Image (spheres, rainbow, N blue to C red):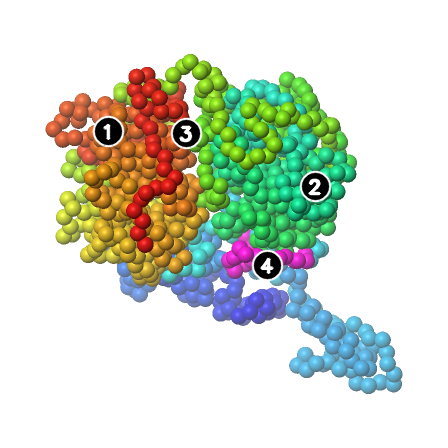
Amino acid sequence: MTSLSRELVFLILQFLEEEKFKESVHKLEKESGFYFNMKYFEEKVQAGEWDEVEKYLSGFTKVDDNRYSMKIFFEIRKQKYLEALDRQDKAKAVEILVSDLKVFSTFNEDLYKEITQLLTLTNFRENEQLSKYGDTKTARSIMLVELKKLIEANPLFRDKLLFPTLKSSRLRTLINQSLNWQHQLCKNPRPNPDIKTLFTDHTCTPSNGPLAPTPVNLPVAAIAKPAVYTSLGAHGPFPPNAATANANALAGWMANASASSSVQAAVVTASSIPVPQNQVSLLKRPRTPPTAPGMVDYQSPDHEQLMKRLRPALSVEEVSYPTARQGSWSLDDLPKTVAVTMHQGSSVTSMDFHPSHHTLLLVGSNNGEIALWELGSRERLVSKPFKIWDTQNCSLAIQTAVVKDAPISVSRVTWSPDGNFVGVAFTKHLIHLYAFPGSSDLNQRLEIDAHVGAVNDLAFAHPNKQLCIVTCGDDKLIKVWDLTGRKLFNFEGHEAPVYSICPHHKENIQFIFSTAIDGKIKAWLYDNMGSRVDYDAPGHWCTTMLYSADGSRLFSCGTSKDGESFLVEWNESEGAIKRPYTGFRKKSTGVVQFDTTQNRFLAAGEDSQIKFWDMDNVNVLTSIDAEGGLSSLPRLRFNKEGNLLAVTTADNGFKILANASGLRSLRTMEPPSFDGLRSPLVESSAIKVSSSSAVTASPVNCKVERSSPVRPSPILNGVDPTGRSVEKSRTTIEDVIDRTKPWQLSEIVDPVQCRLVTMPDSTDTSSKVVRLLYTNSGVGVLALGSNGIQKLWKWARNEQNLTGKATASVVPQHWQPNSGLLMTNDVSGVNLEESVPCIALSKNDSYVMSACGGKVSLFNMMTFKVMTTFMPPPPASTFLAFHPQDNNIIAIGMEDSTIHIYNVRVDEVKSKLKGHQKRISGLAFSTSLNILVSSGADAQLSFWSIDTWEKRKSFTIQLPVGKAPAGDTRVQFHSDQLRLLVVHETQLAIYDASKMERIRQWVPQDVLPAPISYAAYSCNSQIIYASFCDGNIGVFDADSLRLRCRIAPSTYLSQAALNGNQSVYPLVVATHPLDPNQFAVGLTDGSVKVIEPVESEGKWGSTPPMDNGILNGRTASSSTTSNHTPDQSQR
């Protein structure tokens, strides 16, 4: 049915309601399936009209459509059953049990048996779980609350719970308009036409002369109508609590847009980025998505079919709802202490901290210069004065502006979310894109003539996982560019210069908020449909919008032309102001700037002060002047941790304010190595981003504090600022501080030198720990033993562990469901000594897939129940990897050296990849390069295209002389999705996957001579943890493969284990998903240990120097670099 036909049904529903055709209304609701009338449903449930309840539901869902539907029908039939028992009507109860509840026995036989046993009780309240069951009316009300939650979470009810906003008698209005139009077309229109029928077109009979047409209306009697259709529109979604803010951000804005909102023109260029067709409909109505476990986001139309296949049990644990989070804080959390004062040389117009290196600050100035400061060493690493890179190809307008107008200033500097790129917007036409290789330089990447006039703001976004640049300007346009400079979108609709942009995403929907200097707020999807929102910002002038770091709360700050400033929080579900903050004292001569931090605080600069607010309190929390000297309207910027705050000063510089944590980070003798930042200059799109897309653009036509430009000296700190993109070596901070102090390898040999916790109930000498994972949320550790049994440990949130994340300071709980089930793999007929266990965890921690020589089992992580099994041997599965973009697709490495691309939903192998000689031992996807890399026990690497599953290249890794090409080889991608870690018992190696060439290699030597048993990147990919067959653990710098710390087996093994007959050592290493300095090891004695550095150190050793000299009488474990690897290529 077309959208217009669908809308006609709604008009008919409104008409039937107004005319009091009650039964017809609900029949049409059910038969069309377009609108679920929650009020009607509630009435029928409260009345106990169960047949009508199920009949009405049947128009929208069936019992086995998905787990939400199943739970809805189960709750209704269970209530009907309990009411029959309560009436002592055993015959009716048996009938319900057999005819209505029997269907659920297929999915949960134990539950059905328990329900059946209620028949044997005189009063079913004797059952412990039903002891609190009250009277029928109360029970129905309690059930209704649960049913409403389930209905709102059920994807089949999406877009069916809100009746569209219509003016009363909309169908009559349209008919009147049609009749008026027909009357206008009459050759001889009469002044008082007589409308007798709607079955044929209206015409006036000829009269004695032409008369002016008169508007046509239906007879008064026919127009008389009851009140508007409120009964259908009164019931919106179940009110979301604080944690369900990830409901569609724009839905409420659009649902509540005023009728007077202007119709937006959409002059948009064709896009090369495909936009899902359901994005438009997703933006039509708010809804509350479930947070229940699920392999597939319910927005996928394939979800229901998958759930049919998996047939989840009816445990209440499987349908969960979010809970609000609370956190304690104090004023000491605010960065208020002046730690650093720096002189830039020209007034600072924009600042941004590196997303992961929190003491690295990017600064843009009034004179067009950008600078990069390392705050820990108070060193200006880079200085780039403004210049046009390509004068031959730049427009005449730019050249004229440079010659005639005032000096070009920086209006915005910002890092890309992964920290690999820097974007710069200028007050005339241009944007610059630099690549940041991690050294003391920024390499020119791209220059774009982006807008006519000033480019007022710039931000990075990830539509469809493609890193893009979003810009806006004085030409009233918003544009989206890819990293080659190709324009993807041209958003037109603002009627004034666009002041700021705020790209964001909710669920899988990417969008952009924009504000113009006429105070208009608009929102755009990456499509050609024009703006979705047209609202007025408080003050009706220059406004900036920002999300909190977790993306759950939206704020804006702006100033009116009269100088009155406004700081507000928006209610996204309604598109209205939720909370206006107070505390601005005087009228400003410019635009107040602000920022957010820690999901708790707001800060704004006014009257040469910094004012702080608690997000939940409208009153000013505190104000500081930072020891004086700030700009009249200071610009400010928090780092991602929220422990440093950069603010601009009146003397062309900036100050860094810090809290206790920030002061420690600035005082540390060894800031993060910049070599660890280095990455190939190719777009990275797979980094997880938690910081908000903050925008603090310069004012449009209201620039303030513009001092005369001051050029920096030609050479600063050994960096030539003339724009040559030659990477220069940088003196390390350690050398600057103390050149005489030799570097020393950190060696941990005693438990007191680190923090260590052993998982309870983990030691089982009969079963080695062969696979080990952290949950993606960081709250648990999952181990797979060689006996096929999986164990899960979880950390609880309490006074000893406020975050609830995995820590070596607190002993976790060996977690099991109430049923006492174990996650046991199918090992029937399997020789466990020869089997190769494998495991993979879904992104939302809801499901784990594993095998141990037998069939692959899919377990529910809440109930430990087996949801399904597949791929029975032979051949046995030896490695599992979820497709990064589709949890339905799994790459399965096999014992017979093939790789199966398996679709869980349809239970079908879509492709079978052949190219290895022995079993598959590793699989890794790169979404940036669109490849799958496989490794095998034949020491071979193969590269496959994800699109076609064709092999691109295959070669054997370089092994020591005389070593046969054998032994398990494992692979893992760096977080940039470009560099690849390859692990073999003989080596650690880093490959450039884009070129399929080896960059660097390390072989066991010196203090670590034993074969390598396992290795893995830390969560930020700056460290590699490697375990060895003699029990040692090495901590390596990930970029240089230089050893920075050795952890001896005496650190984590008991004296008995060290002196025992059997060697105990780690078989597997897992790294914490959020803390780069925490890792876990699974040992041959069945135990699992989590290890962290002592709190006073905070990290494992220090970055080794780049020379290969003798260090304290010991040769540093060094790496070999090879850019042209003589690996044996095979086609």
- Mark 1 — residue? 1009
Q: Is residue 955 above or below residue 692?
A: below
Amino acid bearing label 4? Ala
**Which residue in the protein does label 3 denote?**
802
Q: Secondary structure at mark 1?
A: loop
Looking at the image, is mark 3 or mark 2 earlier in the sequence?
2
User: In the structure shown, which secondary structural element does the residue marked by tag 3 occupy?
Assistant: loop
> Where, quadrant-wise, is the C terminus in this rendering?
bottom left
Q: Which residue, given by chain and number where applicable, does mark 2 sit on?
A: 428
Which-is-in-front pick, marks 4 and 2?
2
Amino acid identity at mark 3? Leu
Marks 3 and 2 close (CB-CB < 8 Å) = no
Camera-nearest label, 1 or 3: 1
Q: Residue furthest left?
A: 1061
The residue that mark 4 highlights is 270
Residue 619 is situated, as x and y percent measured from the top left of the image, at 63, 30
The residues tagged by marks 4 and 2 sit, at their Cα atoms, a distance apart of 26 Å
From this viewpoint, is residue 1114 visible? yes
Alpha-carbon distance for marks 4 and 1? 58 Å
Amino acid at the residue labelled 2: Lys
Q: Is residue 971 left or right of residue 333?
A: left
